[in-house]
Image (cartoon, coloured by chain):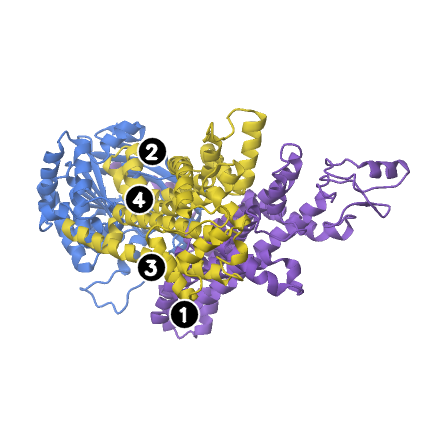
Chain colours: A yellow, B purple, C blue
Amino acid sequence: MTAKERLFWMLKYTIKRVLLAIVTVFIISAITFFAMNAIPGGPFAKEKAPDPAVQAALEARFNLDKPVGQQYLIYMNNLFHGDFGISLKTGREISQIISEKFAVSAKLGGMAALCAVVLGLLLGSIAALCRNKWPDRLIIFLTTLFVSVPSFILATILLLVFALQLKWVGVFSTDNPNYVLPVISLMLYPMSYITRLTKSSMLDVLGQDYIRTARAKGVRESLVIAKHALRNALIPVITYVGPMVAGILTGSMVIETVFSIGGLGTEFVRSINNQDYPMIMATTIFLAILMVIATLLSDLVYKLIDPKITFD
Amino acid sequence: MNNADRLPKKNLLSLQIDLSKFEKATDEEKAQHETMRESTTFFKDGMRKLRKNPLAMMSLIILAVLVISIIVVPFFYPYSYEQMITVNGKRDKTAKNLAPFTYSKMEQKAIDEGQKIFPHIFGTDELCRDYFIRVVYGARVSLAVGLFASLIVLVIGLVYGSVAGYFGGTVDMVMMRIVDIIYSLPDTLMVVLLSVVLNQILGAKLQGTVLAKLGTNMISLFVVFGVLYWVGMARLVRGQILSIRNNEYVLAARALGAKPGRIIKKHILPNCMSVIFISVALQIPSAIFTESFLSFIGLGVQAPMPSLGSLANAARGGMQSYPYKMVFPAIIICLIVLSFNLLGDGLRDAFDPKLRR
Amino acid sequence: MSTPLLQVKNLCTSFNVDSGEVRAVNGVSFNLDKGRVLGIVGESGSGKSVTAYSIMGILVEPGRIKSGEILFNGEDIVKYNKKQMREFRGKRVSIIFQDPMTSLNPVYTIGNQLREAIMLHTDRNRQQANERALEMLKLVGVNSPEQRLKQYPFELSGGMRQRIMIAMALCCEPDILIADEPTTALDVTIQAQILELMQELQKKLGMAIIMITHDLGVIADMCDEIIVMYAGRVCERGTADEIFYNPCHEYTKGLLRSIPRLDTNHARLIPISGSPVDLTNLPKGCAFASRCDNCMKICLSELPEELDINDNHKAACWMNVRQVYNEAAKGGNVE
């Protein structure tokens, strides 16, 4: 297969994957919309809006007297034009709330995802290389521990110990946004998972014949790892990273609430507690789109890094 | 090669002494000669490996102790998880937020009068309920949720996956496309969404039935698992069946005229059961996690029923004043999840055919 | 007599695993002279590959050389440090492996992997390395070599990949090429091509070859000397003619009986009964005793030494001693 053919194949695959992603987004939005409509009274029910003005605005926008199917089409059409509706509680434009809150979440999530991937790959490789020696045991013990603690407990404990008792790091506040603890609490689970994944994948790769070939060529051990093993070991890790990056943004529901960071996650939890259905619906669809995009990207990177899969 | 030290000269002298050594050896002597490797079955060998894994064995013991205590303790424990502590039949409103092993004013008075009062091992909560029994019930609920949810996942996944794997062809393709779509749904979001919706829908319908006691949140949690989480298991089962079905040894068995029943029993099941079993063991902590997450955002089990997640979440507010209320359920939840994770890892190391050489 | 190119003296290699020490190689010795071809024959688990990996210094954990010397031009490479060993590998001694399908890194192009080997041991730049790689590909008979350089391993057939492995092994002009069952994973027709290629290259480049195989037929007309291994020990060694026409070890005889021959009318092949010994638990005496049809009492208790049959032939079997003894008993004196 020539480079040109490969490019063509890649293009074809990308188009196929993008189409699938679009279908997925539609399915998710449909599930969300109809599920919400199954709630007695529907998401835009009169009694739920405290303000008649809000209710009027909703009715005008979604033609609530029309059948549900048609309402869905209208909703999707509005969504397509960036109109997510208005929040029942605050009466504000949801698209505005989302864009404002998402900036905060994205910053937090971005930092956490970066740390998780870098540290996870590093620790996983170390564990694989020092198999059955103390660094391996320590890393595996800690990461197993981290994946066994629910994030809100972990976050609360970190907050209590390091911020309130020891006062090593400042508490997050809007005036003085200290992201250290939120990032750590958000990062630990995915980092641990990536570490374990990298270790097992690395061990698998290190047992392969081509590693023996590289050693037999006289390649130095560090280069055997960095060039020959790591790239192959990355392949299974990448499939996890995409959804993880997106998942961290929803995972921050917990972390943001614990640290009272006014991000999209806090907003989502609040809208659930307030039964602010248009807000729940819009946030779900927005986050789902994010996730689908992230999965799509990781799939494409996956294909790029592994030439064999391109061929199949 | 030197001719000077050729064999006859050197050796004949010494060997002439014992001619009998050059007699042919009997079969028994030959059989004794070789120490054969102990033959083991797959299961025995796996169990041997598992027993040698201290972490897995410790987890097994911890889980056994936990399970036995959460079953046995409520039978003799003098307090109830949903009612206020009473002293001599009177509700004790002074027993609020007691620290572990302390007594309220009323209880202290009763003790001074010579009565015996069972200590509050973990203290009490803000509604004057004994915290230990609440944690015990919480562990009961969390474990039950974990086990039951995993069971649902196992049954649906096993049936769906086997059907897809067994029939193959178009049926398989259609069934797996459905799985792909469900798989691509963001699970946390869908869990939250379905829980919100199901709570609203089921709430009214369940009123007055037995299920109401369980709480709509619990029911919706199981529904969510039944709807969303089985896909991983279905994929696993199908993949296992397909790969095993195409293995040479199955083909060989078929060529020898083995009946499908025998092939399934002798070849397919033993080879995929271990993998499925391990996956179930690892599913339990994930279900417990999901439950605690839902508890956190207010969609967990119905009060007054506690779960470990809801207890820990409720304790967040008074974290600085009453840290023990957070610590106890947190430790138990970690112990359970950690034990299942370590046990699952141990089982995989011991029984996964792919890891064996 | 000048020192041989490679001298292996009493090599012992073990793997420490949970169930004990797997003694894969137990005192193997041999010499290899410049430009000669040595064949090592034996069934699976006889320690042939471990011997090769010990020479290359590519034993994986938990394997390690327990004792013995490996002298290359008189220098003991067991004592080499990591850096010396790296320079030794690939430059002085190269290896090709059994399975060409998995021996090339799937995520790098052929060119990349060839260049890496060349640039490691020579001071050629990328451009020159590329030219050398092309030259090597032509040498091993790969068609349209320019295009191949840009391809990934999975795009090539098994035979093609093995040719590339050979090109990679020979690109730094090593003194010794170790071929670890180079044809086992290939089709029969491709097998012949690869063997022919190796013979041709050996003549052209003049390197010494250690040919490891379980297939006696493969090495019959290629090797100057053959070593037969069983349970990590050498049981017989000699020229190809001696081994094939005058086998003096019961195991070698068994091996020869179990290969099909066109020149005789044997109705059926005679397999060697039983299975290889447990290397964690080597029996006293001869390791082959329990599978041997002519097993004697002494075989079960004492380890046979390697004894000369003639100038070009040695074997470690008590049967030879008995034969000599019998002759002596008949004729009075052997000498």
B33, C312: nearer the viewer? B33
Q: What residue does disc 3 label?
A: A23
What kind of element bears circle 4? helix
Q: What residue does disc 4 label?
A: A232
Q: Is residue A39 above or below residue B343?
A: below
* Discs 1 and 4 lie in a common subunit: no
- Given the image, on which type of amino acid does mark 2 rest? Gly
Q: Chain of mark 1?
A: B
- Which numbered mark, 2 or 4, is in the foreground of this view? 4
Q: CA distance from mark 3 to mark 4?
A: 31 Å
What kind of element bears circle 1? helix
Q: Chain of mark 2?
A: C
Q: Chain of mark 3?
A: A
The answer to which of marks 3 and 4 sits earlier in the sequence is 3
* Discs 3 and 2 lie in a common subunit: no
C97, B39: nearer the viewer? C97
Q: CA distance from mark 2 to mark 4?
A: 36 Å
Q: Chain of mark 4?
A: A
